Image (cartoon, rainbow, N blue to C red):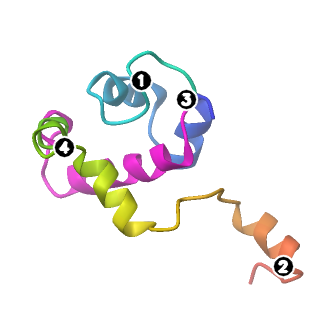
Amino acid sequence: MQIEELSDRTGEPVQRLREWRSLGLIGTQSGGAFSPEDVERVRLVQFSIRHGFTAEAIAEADRKFGGLLNNQVELLFPHGVGDRHPLPEAASTAGMAVE
């Protein structure tokens, strides 16, 4: 997915996502598309920021502890992240009402 879609899925502004990419928190330094794992990495960064950490401190910890964010994503999703679907689409596919 492109950065605009990552922004839509996570609610983070594109500019902030670019900053996080430059810190090595999401994506790759060379650019390119984002993965479903990046959505979860953004959510972990958001959680950490809400609890008082700065993006810079998270990036430092990620480097210091050898991929802390990736390790957390792997713990939370041991079978992989996979694709996500909006609730109305998932309900329709399952033949159910959103309610």
The mark that comes first in sequence, 4 or 3, is: 3
Q: Residues within 10 Å of mark 3 (few under 14, many from 20)?
A: some
Q: Position of residue 17 (x, y in %)?
A: 41, 31
First along the sequence among labels 1 and 4: 1
Q: Secondary structure at mark 4?
A: loop
Q: Residue drawn at (19%, 42%), measured in percent from left and top?
A: 62
Nearer to us of marks 1 and 3 is: 3
Q: Residues within 10 Å of mark 4 (few under 14, many from 20)?
A: few
Which is in the foreground here, disc 2 or disc 4?
4
- Sequence-wise, the earlier of marks 2 and 3 is 3
Query: For mark 3, what is the residue?
Result: 3
- Mark 2 / mark 4, whichever is N-terminal: 4
Provide residue 3's location: percent of width, then percent of height: 55, 29
Sequence-first disc among 1 and 3: 3
Q: Which residues are magenta?
A: 34-58
Residue placed most toward the observer, 43 or 66: 66
Q: Is residue 69 above or below residue 1?
A: below
**Which dot, 4 or 3, sits closer to the camera?**
4
**CA distance for labels 2 and 1:** 36 Å
The residue type indicated by label 2 comes to Ala
